Amino acid sequence: MTVQVRDLVGTAEWSAAAALYRLVFGYTDPVYGLSPRLLAALHENAGSVIGAFDPAGDLVGFCFGFTAVDAGEIYHYSQAAVVHPDAQGTGVGRLLKQAQAGTARATGARTMRWTFDPYAVRNAHFNLAVLGATGIRFLPDYYGRGTDRILVSWDLTGPPVRGPVTRTVAASGRDQLRRQLAGAFAAGGRLVGVDRDPVAYHFAEDA
């Protein structure tokens, strides 16, 4: 699919992005909605509000994020990236992330962070293998009970530098995998890879 990726501007485009966000995640409760006014504020204050449009001019993908700081390190936090179900698997997600990385670099950030569901293995593969991000922290119940997340960091200055794999985590059940992931991160490991069949996560120490 040939798409145009660019900053979203104006109330109509921010509203369309909010609607796509609800559609992709299946949100119906207003508490989980996304305010177009928030997107307006991010757009004007060093945030990222980026859309992907198909040849007909329809919005098929969207991501947004903001500048953040951790122990003096300035990074860009990508809160969400969504792709319309009809456009998934066509490379739109990668184009959005690449555009978001450009926005992040313009703010002076050298890394970008976001979280993903460790039990969504396809998403894990995209983050770790396709983009080259590294898992740096396990966040149990991040948004509430049953919403475990892994925090990743993506180096925007060049390809990742990773040490050899020192530990592999594999489990047949969600609860067991949760315990093993938490243990691997607590032991100082950094998540660098995933196998999808059977599911196995690979950890390395800092290079």
Image (cartoon, grey):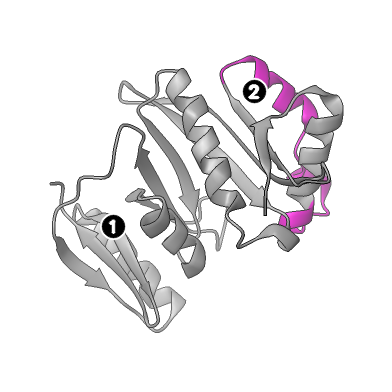
Residue 34 lies in magenta, yes or no?
A: yes
**Residue at 29% across, 37% down:** 158
**Residue at 86% across, 30% down:** 12
Which amino acid type is marked by label 2? Answer: Leu
Residue 120 visible from this viewpoint: no
SS class, disc 1:
strand
Q: Which residue is tagged 1?
A: 192
Q: Left or right: 45 with respect to 141?
A: right
Q: Left or right: 37 with respect to 141?
A: right
Looking at the picture, how far across and down is residue 192, in whole percent?
28, 57
What range of the chain is rendered magenta? 23-46
Looking at the picture, how far across and down is residue 63, in whole percent?
63, 40
Magenta part, dominant SS:
helix
In depth, the one of 205 and 81 nearer the eye is 81
Looking at the picture, how far across and down is residue 114, in whole percent?
47, 43
SS class, disc 2:
helix
Which amino acid type is marked by label 1? Answer: Val
